[in-house]
Amino acid sequence: MKTLFKALIQALLVALLVGTLCFFMTRLLPGDTAYRIAAGRYGYDMVDAAAAQAVRIELGLDRAPLAALADWWGRLLRFDLGVSLVTAQPVIDEIRLQLGQTLRLSLMAVLLSLPLGPLPGVLAGLRPGGWFDRVNLAISVLLRALPPFVLALLLVLAFAVQMQALPAAGHADRGSLMLPALTLALGLAAVSSRVARDAMASVRASSYYAFALGKGLSASQALLRHGARNVATPVVAYTAVQLVYLVEGVVLVETIFAWPGIGHALVHAIFARDVPMIQGTALVLGLMFVLFNCVVDLACAALDPRARRA
Amino acid sequence: MTEHCRRLTPRRRALVRLSRLLAAGAALHLPSADAHDGPLSEHAAIVPASRDTLTVVGPWELTGLEPSRGGYMFTRMEVAQTLLDADDQGRLLPAIASDWEVSKNGLEWRFFIEQGRLFHDGSPLIAGTVLASLKRALAAPGVLRLARIRSMAVSRGAILVTLAQPYAPLPYLFTHSGTQVLAPSSYGADGRVLRIVGSGPYRITSVSLPQQFDVEFFDQWRGEPPLVRRARYISVSRAETRTLMVQSGQADLAFTLDPPSIRRLLKQKNVELVAAPLPRTTFLKLNAGHPLLSDVRVRQAISLALDRDGIARALLRDADLGATQLFPPALALWHQKAMAPLRSDPAAARALLRQAGYAPGADGIARRGGQRLALTLTTFVDRPELPLIATAVQEELRQIGIAVKVVVGNSSDIPAGHRSGALEIGLVARNFGSLPDPVATLADDYGLEGGDWGAMGWHSAALTDALARLAGGGIVADSPEAARLRAGIAGELQQGLPVIPVVWYRQTMAVSRRVTGASIDPFERSYRISALAWKASA
C-alpha cells in the first residue's frame, strides 16, 4: 500500500517535471519552430516563409510561453495530450500504438534475457573462479562493451544476411521481433549474469548454505530451497537499474530495426519539433519507469520478508 | 518441512496467478497494437509479406494521409494519380486529364477529364470529385500558390482554372503529388483524410502509420495489368538497415543509399545497382547584400577556391558529380553543354581578392581597411552529406584567406535567415525537379526579391525578364526562342554567382535479382513498380 502510494506521488512528480522540462527544452532548441514543423509536415523542399507563417497562425506559436505551458498543464489534468503538430493525429492514439510495439519488444527482450543472463550467472556462481565463470565474465564484458548498434549490425549480418533465417528489419513479418529483442536481451544478460553470479557466490559462501548442505540436502535441493530466493532478490532489484539500459536501448534499437515504437517516435518528434509528441512520449517513458520500479519493489517485497517488515 | 512448504503455497499460487495475468495481458493488449490502426486510418491490419510481395524500402516516413503531407508516397506507389504526368525529360503526359488547352490570353485553362475511370471503391472518377481534391490542395501550403489562381470550377466535364495573370507552367503544378485526386469516400465527416481511395493501378490494402503500407493490383484498372500484383512500402530511417534488408533478400527495391553501402552492394551477387542523375544541386547561397559579399569578385574568388571534383570524389565517392554549373545534366533542357564550366584555381582566387582590395593579414586571413574577411556558413543535417561538404568548403576558403565559421542547424535556418537578413552563406541542396519544369521553381528563387532557397540581395533584370517570358506563356518549350532564354538564364547565374554550385546528385537504387525492368524516375514521382517483372527463376 505504502509502495503504491509512493509510486503515485512519484508518477505525479515525473509527469509535471518531464512535461515542463520538455516544454522549455524544445523552446530552447535552435531554429525557428514554425519553419521546423512545416519542414516535418511538407518536406524541407516545400518550406518557405508562407508555409511557416501558416503553421505559426494555425498552432498559435506566437503565444506567450507561460500561457502555452499553463495550457498544457491544464490539458494534462484532463488526460488530454493534444494533437501531433506533424501528423494532426491525437497524440494519445499515436502513443497507444507505439507503446504497444515498445512493450512487445521490451517484454520479449526481458524474457529472452532470463535464460541468457541469470541462468549462466547462477551456474558460474556455483563454482567461482572455474572455467565457466571465466568464460562467462569474458562474454559479459564483451557484450556490455559493444554498443547496441554494433551488436545489432552483427546479429543482422549473421541471422538475416548469412543464414537468411530472420527478417533484417521491419515489424510485420514472421520473426521480425526476434533480432531487435535479442540485441536488447544480450545487453541486459551481460550485466544480470554477473549480478546473479555474485549473488550466487555469496550465498554459496554463507553459513546457512553450508548448514543446508551439512544437514544432508542434495546440491539441487539446497539451491532450490535456500539459494534461489536469496539470489533472486538482488537480480530482481537490479532489473530496476537495468530499465535505464532498456529505455536507452529501445531508442537506438528501434531506429536501427525500423521498429515503430515509442523511442523511434521520440527521435522523429524531436527532429520535427513536434512538441506535444515530445511531451507525450517523454511523459509515457517516465511513467513507465515509475510503473516498472513499483512492480520491482512489489516483487522484491514478495521475495524478501525483510523488505516487507521494514 | 512439509509445513514450511504449505505455508509458502498461497504466495506461490499468487505469483503463478500474477504471471498468468501478465501473460494474458500481453496476449490481449499487444497483438491489438499490431492488428489495427484505430482512428489513425481506417485501413485493415498489416499481415506478413507473402513471397509474391515486392518490398520497397526508403527513408521517408508517412507523416499522415493528407496529400500535402505523406501524399507523395501514394503517388510513388501508384495508388493515387494526379491530373497530369511527366516523362523522364520533363515533358507532360496525360493522366487523369486526357488533354488540356489554354485561352489566347493565357488566363483560362481547361483540363479535360478522361471518362470511364473508376476509383478503388468503384465510384466513377468525374470532374466534380477532381475539383474537390484540387480545391483542398489550393487551401493547403503547396505548389498551387505559385500560380495566381482566381477560381477553379467544373465546366462541361472539364476543370476550368482561371488565373489572375498568365502562367505557362500551370500544367506542371498539376503533376505534383500534393494535387493528387482522391475519391469522396476518402474523407471523414470532419473533412480529414481517413483512408486513401485513389484511381491508380494499385489499391491500398493496409496502412500502419507512420511506417508501412501494403498495396495490391486494382482489378478494375483499365490499363495493362502489371506483373507485380502485391507490394509493400516500409520506411526505414537508417541507410545501413536498408542496405542489409536488400542484401538479405527482405527488400526488393532500396532507395537513398550512402556511399559506403553502395560500395558494399557492388560486390553482392543477388543485388543490382541502378543509378540515375537527379535534378538536384548543392550550392552555396550567398547574401549578396552583405558588405563582404556584395563584390562579385569576392563571390568569384569563393567559386574558384572550391575543389568540386575533390569534394565529389572524397565525400560522394563519385567524381562525376562536381558541378560545373547550376543546372545538372538531369535537367536536359536547362543544362548548357556549351557554357564555360566553373573551375578550381586557388591562385586566381587570391588574385581576385587582391584586386578587390584585400591583403593577407598576419593570421593568413584577408583584410581590407582593418576588416577581416570572416563569414558564417549555415547548413543543416537533413541531408547527411551537407555538414561534411561544409567543412571541406571551410578549409578550401581558409586556404585563399577567407575565415569561415560553420553552423550546423536545421533546414529552417535557411528560409528564416533569408527573411531576417541574418544569413551570410548557406549550404543547401535544392531540388529543381519537384516540378518537372523548373521555371516555376526558378521564378520563385530568382525573382526580384530573391527566394528562400535562391538568390539573396541579388537580382538581374535580364534574368527576371527571361523567366517572366518563359512563365508568361506564348513560347513553346522546345522552340529555339525558349532555348535561347534558358541559355541566357544559365549564363546570368554563372556570371553573377548569386549562388555557387558545388555538387550534383545521383540517385542510386538497389534492386534484388528477383525482379527485372527497374528504372529510376528522375523526378521521384513514381517507383514504377507496375513496370517490373519477376525473374523466371525466382
Image (tube, rainbow, N blue to C red):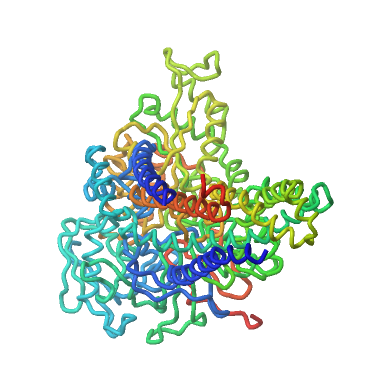
Q: Is residue B527 visible?
A: no
Task: Give percent across and percent down for residue A138.
Answer: 76, 48
Quadrant housing residue A82: bottom left
Which residue is at a point 33% across and 30% down the rendered structure image?
Answer: B289
Q: Position of residue A256 (x, y in %)?
A: 56, 56
Q: Vertically, is B457 above or below B246?
A: above
Q: Quadrant of residue B495?
A: top left
Which residue occupies the foreground of this view, A249 or A111? Answer: A111
The one nearer the camera, B8 or B210, is B8
Nearer-the-camera pick, B171 or A223: A223
Give above or below for B257 relative to B390: below
Say whether residue B101 is left or right of residue A177: left
Q: Does residue B348 appear in this view?
A: yes
Residue B43 at x, y = what percent?
37, 74
Residue B160 at x, y percent in the picture = 18, 70
Q: Residue at x 59, y 75 (%)?
A: B515
Nearer to me, A15 or A65: A15
> In the rendered view, would you say A210 is above or below B154?
above
Residue at image position (49%, 55%) is A295
In the rendered structure, the answer to whether residue A128 lies left or right of residue B34 reads right
